[in-house]
């Protein structure tokens, strides 16, 4: 297959977004209990450099979580990798405080993430993709103590890496509407800015955005402001945007303690979590963004401009190309006849599917236990529950909403979650075990 190094790692991270970046920091700050040395760790990231939602770094967009919910503070308030430490290092701490705002711009938070990633850059291998995991051949008749990872570099060469634990954090998968395929004029929001910058704004006359969440609303606002000569259609499956509940009691669902409440609760209680609190994060929009869009909508009509149109209770049922035109087929839930929009491009801000590591695990998946719905059974410390012969750890950062609740793939609990995984690896036992 490829060259295999002699070195054995204590942990290998697959992917290096914010979650595994936070884990790298936690591992650096948690010294081994046995000899005071750091665990031997490496992280493989297929991107050539660190980047997190670069294509949604739109002007005037802010984070939806407090700056205190950074990579480290909730786990270690004295961490040198905190957002406050970043501000101090950047010479902007006083100015940030003068803003009197808990929510930094998305651009500044991305700068913070890049700064933190540079601080642990010695354990990251960019342009390096883990393509498969498997048990060692000699382990197939006994306990599985180590895993082998096939890692492909930027030149396409594959080598093998040996580890005692693996933490998979490959991120969410962009979701497109049923029957819609992406092309040079049909984009998912995850590639928005890169695609938009290739266009000639002066030639754009009609654009459309489909979706009812924060990204859809932000892109609609951006296009309305950037293209004063163009018609902007916002295609929304609901009657209008729904407001995100960020009130104090509702926000408790993102507290670290809520993970235990969810994990150790009944199926009925878990269902209640989702029914009552999904409006804190899913298909909802911040109040100021909603009001700003409606003000634009109203001002357009005041000036008889009619540039911003909200096509509500409507879904996209298909897309076809005719020359330079993209024709979007619409299905109204009001029972109206199907209709079409002719636009220069369509942006699908239609969310993401959960991380699914089955393909990466390959034959190793046979050792991973599942629940009655076919989902991975998970330990409290984010390890996949495996058959007894597997003694190495397979951890997930993401894809655990069914066991750990709403924060499984969000920034809100990132520092504590990574700390728990680091602690589990260090101690070789689940969180809370005696």
Image (spheres, rainbow, N blue to C red):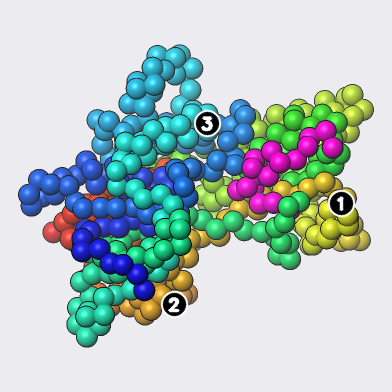
| Residue situated in front as seen by the camera: 50 or 189 | 50
Is 318 a magenta residue? Answer: no
Q: Which residue is mark 1?
A: 325
Q: Earlier in the sequence, mark 3 or mark 1?
A: 3
Left or right of 396, for residue 335? right
The circle on residue 152 is none
Left or right of 206, for residue 218? left
Asked if residue 85 is positioned above or below residue 17 in the image, the reply reads above
> Crowding near pointer 3: few (<14 within 10 Å), some, many (20+)?
some
Residue 255 in sight in this render: yes
Looking at the rendered image, the quarter that the C terminus falls into is bottom left
Left or right of 79, for residue 249? right
The circle on residue 107 is 3
Can you give x and y, in whole percent of width and height, for residue 376 in the image?
40, 70
Check the image and name the residue furthest to the bottom.
141
Secondary-structure class at tag 2: loop
Asked if residue 407 is positioned above or below residue 91 in the image, the reply reads below
Residue at 71% of width from left, 41% of height from top?
198
Stretch of the chain drawn in magenta = 186-203
The circle on residue 372 is 2
| Residue situated in front as seen by the camera: 350 or 197 | 197
Tell me where residue 98 sits by quadrant: top left
Can you give x and y, in whole percent of width and height, for residue 137 in the image?
26, 80
Tell me where residue 425 sits by quadrant: bottom left
Secondary-structure class at tag 1: strand
Please name which of the two marks, 3 or 2, marks the residue nearer to the observer: 3
Can you give x and y, in whole percent of width and height, for residue 163 in the image?
25, 63
Secondary-structure class at tag 3: helix
The overriding secondary structure of the stretch rendered in magenta is helix
Q: Are marks 2 and 1 in contact (CB under 8 Å)?
A: no
Residue 402 in sight in this render: no
Q: Earlier in the sequence, mark 2 or mark 1?
A: 1
């Amino acid at each position: 297959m490829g060259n295999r190094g002699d070195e054995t790692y204590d942990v290998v991270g697959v992917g290096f977004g914010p979650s595994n970046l936070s884990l790298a920091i936690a591992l650096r700050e948690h010294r081994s209990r046995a000899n005071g040395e750091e665990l031997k760790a490496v992280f493989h990231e297929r991107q050539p450099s660190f980047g997190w939602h670069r294509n949604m770094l739109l002007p005037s967009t802010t984070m939806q979580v407090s700056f205190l919910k950074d990579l480290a503070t909730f786990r270690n308030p004295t961490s040198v990798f905190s957002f406050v430490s970043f501000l101090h290092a950047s010479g902007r701490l006083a100015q940030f405080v003068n803003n009197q705002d808990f929510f930094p711009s998305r651009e500044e938070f991305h700068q913070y993430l890049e700064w933190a990633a540079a601080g642990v850059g010695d354990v990251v291998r960019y342009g390096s993709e883990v393509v498969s995991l498997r048990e060692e051949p000699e382990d197939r008749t006994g306990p599985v103590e180590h895993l082998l990872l096939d890692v492909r570099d930027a030149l396409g060469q594959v080598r093998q890496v040996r580890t005692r634990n693996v933490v998979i954090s490959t991120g969410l998968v962009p979701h497109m509407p049923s029957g819609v395929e992406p092309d040079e004029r049909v984009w998912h929001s995850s590639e928005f800015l890169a695609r938009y910058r290739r266009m000639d704004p002066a030639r754009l006359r009609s654009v459309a955005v489909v979706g009812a969440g924060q990204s859809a609303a932000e892109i609609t606002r951006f296009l309305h402001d950037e293209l004063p000569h163009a018609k902007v259609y916002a295609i929304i499956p609901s009657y209008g945007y729904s407001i995100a509940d960020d009130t104090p009691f509702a926000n408790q669902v993102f507290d670290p303690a809520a993970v235990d409440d969810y994990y150790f609760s009944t199926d009925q209680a878990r269902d209640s979590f989702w029914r009552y609190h999904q409006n804190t994060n899913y298909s909802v929009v911040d109040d100021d963004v909603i009001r700003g869009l409606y003000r634009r909508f109203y001002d357009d009509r005041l000036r008889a401009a009619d540039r911003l149109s909200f096509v509500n209770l409507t879904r996209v049922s298909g897309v076809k190309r005719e020359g330079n035109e993209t024709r979007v087929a619409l299905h109204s839930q009001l029972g109206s006849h199907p209709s079409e929009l002719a636009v220069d491009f369509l942006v699908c801000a239609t969310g993401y599917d959960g991380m699914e590591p089955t393909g990466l695990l390959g034959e190793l998946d046979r050792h991973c236990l599942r629940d009655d719905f076919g989902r991975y059974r998970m330990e409290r410390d984010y390890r996949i529950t495996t058959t007894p012969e597997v003694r190495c750890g397979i951890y997930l950062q993401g894809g655990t909403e069914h066991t750990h609740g709403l924060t499984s793939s969000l920034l809100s609990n990132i520092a504590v979650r990574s700390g728990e995984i680091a602690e589990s690896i260090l101690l070789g036992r689940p969180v809370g075990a005696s």
